[in-house]
Structure formats: structure tokens, C-alpha cells
Image: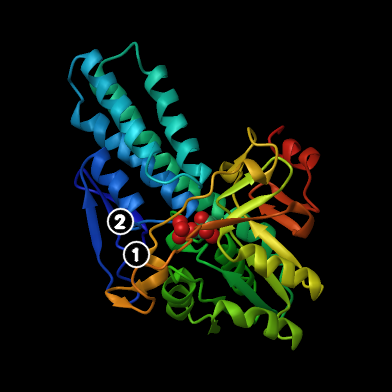
């Protein structure tokens, strides 16, 4: 399964809004369409958003390859702007845009055709690197999952949320591949249902035993001793280890601490924002109230009711047992260990 792929000069994305009922790709041919695909949740999940944005810039560069330098630069500026405005929380988006911007600067002395080709090569490299990085996260995290473990996860940090393999689900896949008979408890993840629609689907596809539960069942299951470990992904990690992830993750972390269940975050270094000292500075996306009051045309709340719909929350580092990265696992994360990850 390819979450995003390059075909005949276009970016193709699995339309995640339609899963699990339909599996189809939609194509993007410019930065504007790519930004709309991110904003409208065709593609979602921090690393997948980053890779998609890189292709969004590359598409725009290809469209203007051969143009005069000033025109090429203006088009790219507009692409950076529209893509950066698509969603605010996942830092991978801004990380990817910055890498493309650096590529633009480095290729300034050659032709715009050469610059556009270099940018497309970089987008391809970011996509294939992301798969390798997820495999490394999986390898590093698998030893933390015991034989027979019942693993709770929240939202979807799977192949669909990355270029492939996944972060939290990458750990689960790698543990299974290492011969562990594990099972997954997928929290539904209200209001957008990434757990029910995407995580449950990925696990069913791969014959990994999965039990779908609504979010408010997590505490009960932990109290009954039916959860051995929690593994989730991340959208942005501050330097002190505070972690923004899908709304409801904080609740699960508090419950895990109460029940002395290890709580791990699996994420690549591109999800760590070294410019942000602590979680309170992470911008939290507020989404359409319609996601809370109904779903796909069905409405269950009274017309005009006041709604809050923050899409992410921040789990303080103190509640996190460890962060699993491609460069290894840091236990009881803090600024010193997180900075050290970037030093080698
Ligand atoms: O709103 P979404 O679906 O983009 O939120 C996704 C998450 O919160 C994921 O857990 C996170 O991006 C990690 S994906 C490997």
C-alpha cells in the first residue's frame, strides 16, 4: 500500500476520507491542490503531511521549470505560503517546506529546469527516507513490546499517516514481524474516527488481531488489566518532551499513569520542534464544529449549539515512559536527551 505515490508527473494520494468504505487515489497537479488535500484530510498524519507538502512544492517547481528565475521564485514563494497555511500543528509540514526552501537556495546558480528536477528528487528522497525511518522506529520499539502484549493505540499513526510502515503501528508491525503474538486495542478517536476508520482497517488488512473500542472505554479496560502498554504517534514534540498528538491522547496518558501502564510515543526526529521549549507553545488546530455535531450528513446535536473542536492535545513529558525514534529510545524524556538526539 502506497499512501502517496508519484505517477506520470502527478502526486497521487489515497483518499483517506473515504476509507474504509472505498479505496481510491486522488491526484494533485499543483501546490494549491496539494494544500487543499492536506487541509481537507485526503492525507493526514504528521510524516505523511510532510512528504505530501514536499511534493506540493515539487509540483509547483515542475510547472514553472524553464521559466525565468524571478517567475520561478515567485511561484515557489506562493507554494510555500499556501502549503504552510494548510494545517498548523504537525511540525513535519514546516520541516518539509524548509527543506524544499533550502533546496531552492542551493540550486539558485543553475537553470530553473535543474532546480525543479533537484526539488523533485528531494521529494522522492524524503518519501523513501520516511519509510526507512519508520522501519528503524519499528526496530527500536519492538523490544519494548512483550510477547502476548495487548497494545492500546489512539488515532492512526500507521502506514497511512506516513509514507509507509507507520510510527506507533510501525512498532506494532515490527513486533509482530519479530514473532510476537500481540493484539491491538484501537481507540475509535472521536470526532474524526481515525482509530475506527484507519487503524482498525490497517490491522484487519494485515491480520493483526485488533479490538475496536470507543474512547471512553479506555479507563475501564485498563482497570480490568486488559491493556499492557500504550503506543501512540506525535504531531509535534517540544524540546522538553511534551507531546502534541490527536485529541484524547492526554486522557489516555493520565489513565495509563494511574494504572502503571507504560506509555510510549513513537515519532521521527522530524516531529521534534527544537524551537519550542515546552508543550504550551505548540499551536493547536481548531477544526470545524460540524465534525462534532454530526458525521457525513447525519446530525445528532441541536442546531446552533456552541461547539469546541480542538484537534490535538498536549501530553506532558512526565507522563511519557519513553519516546521511540529512529535514533533509539529515550526513557523519561527531557531536554538534555532530546537535544542529544540531534548531536550525532
Ligand atoms: O488529524 P490527523 O489525523 O492528522 O492526526 C494524526 C495524529 O494525531 C497522529 O497520531 C500523528 O500525526 C502521528 S502520525 C505517524
Residue 86's place in the image compared with 165, above or below, is above
In this view, which residue lies farthest toward the bottom? Answer: 224
SS of the residue under disc 1: loop
Q: Which residue is mark 2?
A: 13
Q: Quadrant of residue 69?
A: top left
* Above/below status of 166 relative to 96: below
Residue 185 to residue 328: above or below: below
What is the crowding at mark 1: few (fewer than 14 residues within 10 Å), some, or many (at least 20)? Answer: many
The quadrant of the picture occupied by the N terminus is: bottom left
Asked whether mark 1 lies closer than 8 Å to ligand 1, one says no
Q: Is residue 148 visible?
A: no
Q: Image point 34% across, 54% down: which residue?
A: 4
Mark yes or no: residue 3 visible: yes
Depth order, front residue of 153/248: 248
Do the residues under discs 2 and 1 have CB atoms within 8 angstroms? Answer: yes
Q: Is residue 51 left or right of residue 224?
A: left
* Mark 2, other Cα within 10 Å: few <14 / some 14–19 / many ≥20: many
Along the viewing direction, whichever of 263 and 128 lies nearer the viewer: 263
Q: Which picture quadrant has residue 25?
A: bottom left
Tag on residue 112? none
Residue 199 place in picture, x, y as percent: 48, 72
Question: Which residue corresponds to mark 1?
Answer: 16
Amino acid at each position: 500500500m502506497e499512501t502517496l505515490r508519484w505517477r506520470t508527473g502527478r502526486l497521487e494520494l489515497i483518499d483517506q476520507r473515504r476509507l474504509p468504505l472505498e479505496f481510491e487515489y486522488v491526484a494533485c497537479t499543483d501546490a494549491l491542490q496539494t494544500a487543499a488535500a492536506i487541509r481537507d484530510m485526503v492525507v493526514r498524519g504528521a510524516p505523511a503531511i510532510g512528504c505530501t507538502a514536499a511534493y506540493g512544492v515539487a509540483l509547483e517547481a515542475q510547472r514553472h521549470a524553464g521559466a525565468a528565475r524571478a517567475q520561478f521564485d515567485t511561484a515557489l514563494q506562493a507554494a510555500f505560503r499556501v502549503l504552510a497555511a494548510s494545517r498548523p500543528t504537525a511540525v513535519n509540514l514546516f520541516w518539509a517546506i524548509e527543506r524544499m526552501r533550502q533546496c531552492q537556495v542551493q540550486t539558485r546558480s543553475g537553470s530553473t529546469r535543474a532546480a525543479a528536477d533537484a526539488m523533485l528528487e528531494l521529494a522522492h528522497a524524503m518519501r523513501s527516507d520516511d519509510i526507512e525511518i519508520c522501519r528503524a522506529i519499528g526496530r527500536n520499539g519492538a523490544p519494548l513490546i512483550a510477547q502476548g502484549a495487548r497494545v492500546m493505540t489512539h488515532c492512526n499513526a500507521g502506514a497511512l499517516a506516513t509514507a509507509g510502515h507507520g510510527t506507533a503501528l510501525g512498532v506494532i508491525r515490527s513486533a509482530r514481524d519479530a514473532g510476537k503474538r500481540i493484539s491491538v486495542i484501537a481507540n475509535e478517536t472521536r470526532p474524526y474516527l481515525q482509530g475506527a476508520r484507519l487503524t482498525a482497517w490497517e490491522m484487519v488488512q494485515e491480520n493483526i488481531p485488533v479490538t475496536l473500542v470507543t474512547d471512553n472505554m479506555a479507563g475501564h479496560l485498563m482497570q480490568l488489566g486488559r491493556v499492557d502498554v500504550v503506543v501512540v504517534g506525535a504531531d509535534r514534540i517540544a524540546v522538553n518532551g511534551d507531546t502534541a498528538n490527536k485529541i484524547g491522547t492526554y486522557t489516555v496518558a493520565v489513565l495509563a499513569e494511574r494504572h502503571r501502564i507504560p506509555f510510549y510515543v513513537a515519532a521521527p526526529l522530524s516531529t521534534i520542534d527544537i524551537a519550542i521549549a515546552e508543550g504550551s507553545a505548540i499551536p493547536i488546530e481548531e477544526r470545524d464544529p460540524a465534525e462534532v455535531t454530526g458525521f457525513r450528513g447525519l446530525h445528532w446535536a441541536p442546531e446552533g449549539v456552541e461547539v469546541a473542536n480542538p484537534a490535538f492535545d498536549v501530553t506532558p513529558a512526565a507522563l511519557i515512559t519513553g519516546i521511540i525514534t529512529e535514533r533509539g529510545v529515550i526513557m523519561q524524556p527531557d531536554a538534555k536527551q532530546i537535544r542529544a538526539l540531534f548531536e550525532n
